[in-house]
Image: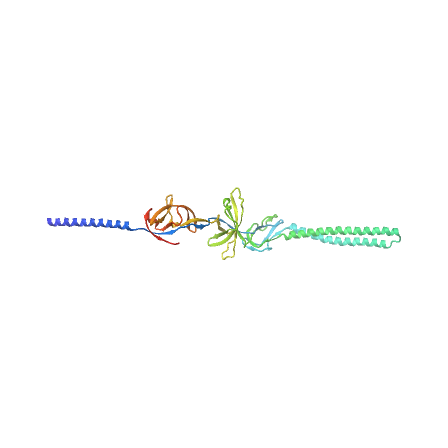
Amino acid sequence: MYKKILYFFLFSLIGISAYFSFFHLSSLSSEDKNISIIPQVKTISVSPTNIQRTEEFSGFVQGVKQADIAPSIPGYVIRLMKEEGETVYQGETIALLESKELSATEKSTLEALNASDQVLQKTKKYYDQKVDEAKVNFDTATNDVEKISAEEALKSAKRLRDTQIATVKAQKTSLEGTLFVSRENVSRTYIKAPFTGIITAKNTSLGSYVAPGTPLYSLASAHSLEVVLSVPSSLVSHIKKGTSVSVVDGTKKMSGVIYSFSSVSKESSQRSSVHIRLENNTSSNPFSLSEYVKVILPIGEPSLAFLVPETALISQYDDTFLFIVENAIAKKHSVTLGNIFDGKREILSGIDDKMHIITEGQYTIKNNQSVSETYVTE
């Protein structure tokens, strides 16, 4: 009995010793294994790249030619022939005014002109008769005294005839001028499009009484388009007339050019206007009037800068850094960030030319740790 108990304790002791010996050896093996593994990283080389700094602004597409179509005479609107968004052609009638005063003036002037024709005919007939009578008296005179008297009477009759006829003709000419102006004014009740374009606004309604200069419609050219941007005046000195720009709206993209800009700003806002002409509006997805678009505006001259992938950067608290590889050692470099260009981040300070930047594996390493580098050529 005692032997069995002794054997039991003996074998238990051996088993416990073996277990702890195995655990200790396993721990040592795991530590040795961790120490022997060198992290794998991928790197790229960086060099200064030419970049163009840009700013993004938004604006509405509008016609280069724009006009508020307004009558030059007063009257009631009796017809509006176009709606907003419709195309009109140069010289096409788009509205009609009713002006009773103009119609009455034309009618009365025409009546007066017809009456003046009758007066002219009667005047000529009457004074021609007087001249004929004076001529008969001159022809029948029997002595010199009668001849001289009859001659003076004939000359007087001719002068009077010519004066009276000239007076009536002047009155007729005046009436013809009045009729021409009246008819011109009546023709102005027909409101016509000054150029081909698209109606961008309908500013009145049927039956309205409008004064001269009151806009009935707003019209803009449909094929010659531009975008007018409001930019900070401080940027105007950094942009150039004739510079190409990109105009985008969702999937649509079009090229444009800086056509003009105002160098004098509005003091209240300190902003200036920049006009962007769209170069081509015949693509399958053209921009339309009043469409809201974004314009990528180049600022200044191209310059050299370091660009690295965003994935290479690590941010912790207030520090942004990356790792470089130098002599198979990973070294931490804090960097100052600039703008984003084509998905890459500009580095203003913290790296130098030809450095190998770690782009993969940087999250599992520490500063001054040995690494196994795989260099990737971009």
Q: Determine the residue positioned at 82% across, 51% down.
A: 155
Q: Horizontally, is 302 left or right of 175 in the view?
A: left
Q: x%, y% of residue 315?
A: 37, 46
Instruction: Name the spot of residue 30 as percent of width and height, x first.
Output: 26, 50
Q: Would residue 322 be found to the left or right of residue 86 on screen?
A: left
Q: Position of residue 78 (x, y in %)?
A: 60, 52
User: Where residue 47 sits in the image (x, y, percent)?
Assistant: 41, 50
Instruction: Identify which residue, 358 or 82, lies in the foreground.
Output: 358
Q: Does residue 173 appear left or right of residue 288 in this picture?
A: right
Residue under the point 88% across and 52% down: 144
Q: Is residue 108 visible?
A: no
Q: Nearer the viewer, residue 165 or 19?
A: 19
Query: Which residue is at a point 28% across and 49% down the rendered structure image?
Result: 35
Query: Can residue 184 be spotted in the picture?
Result: yes
Determine whether 44 is above or below 267 in the image.
Answer: below
Residue lying furthest right in this view?
143
Q: In which quarter of the image is residue 349?
A: top left
Q: In this rendering, would 131 be left or right of 314?
A: right
Where the C terminus falls, by quadrant? bottom left
